[in-house]
Image (cartoon, helix red, strand yellow):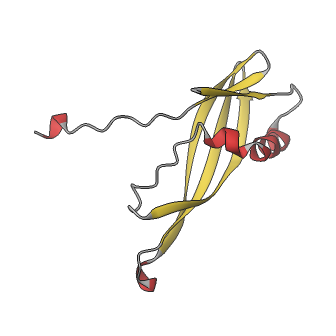
Amino acid sequence: MSERLLPLSPELNGDTLVAYLNKHIDDVKHACDLDVSWAYIRAVIDDVRVISATRELGEIRIEYRYDYTAHCACKNLDASDFYTDQLSCKILEGNIVLPKFVPQERSTFEEF
């Protein structure tokens, strides 16, 4: 499935919209870039949550945060941190359209 539809009530806005999206975080995660390999190859995501959401005409902007940790087999090298990012989704027929996140294909074409 390439996208998920999440029903959106017209009265949801601000904090109530954030709470609603956090209640349905598994659907929201479907559209998020949750690749933490940039931080460390052994990093894993501990928590994902929506921290803000704004509705505009036919679109919703979602800001999310994820916490991650990296266990490096040596206590003084272990790390934990967080990262925030955002995504925009269309609102179509009373639903938030959450597209599946597809990472850009990595290319080394320009390196040679």
**Residue drawn at x 46%, y 63% as measured from the top left:** 43
Q: In this rendered view, identify the residue nearer to me: 106 or 65.
A: 106
Query: In the visual, does 88 lie left or right of 36?
Result: right
Where is residue 17? Give x, y as percent.
Answer: 80, 39
Query: In the visual, does 80 lie left or right of 52?
Result: left
77 versus 103 height, above or below: below
**Residue drawn at x 70%, y 49% as measured from the top left:** 51
106 versus 56 height, above or below: below
Residue placed furthest toward the right: 11
Q: In this rendered view, identify the residue nearer to me: 34 or 57.
A: 34
Where is residue 96? Give x, y as percent.
Answer: 72, 26
Image quadrant for the N terminus? top right
Residue 18's image quarter?
Answer: top right
**Residue drawn at x 39%, y 63% as measured from the top left:** 40
Query: In the visual, does 9 lie left or right of 100?
Result: right
Where is residue 30? Give x, y as percent.
Answer: 61, 38
Residue placed furthest toward the left: 112
19 versus 73 height, above or below: above
Count of labels shown?
0
Residue placed furthest toward the front: 1
Where is residue 112? Give x, y as percent.
Answer: 10, 39
Q: In this rendered view, identify the residue nearer to me: 16 or 106.
A: 106
Residue 76's image quarter?
Answer: bottom left
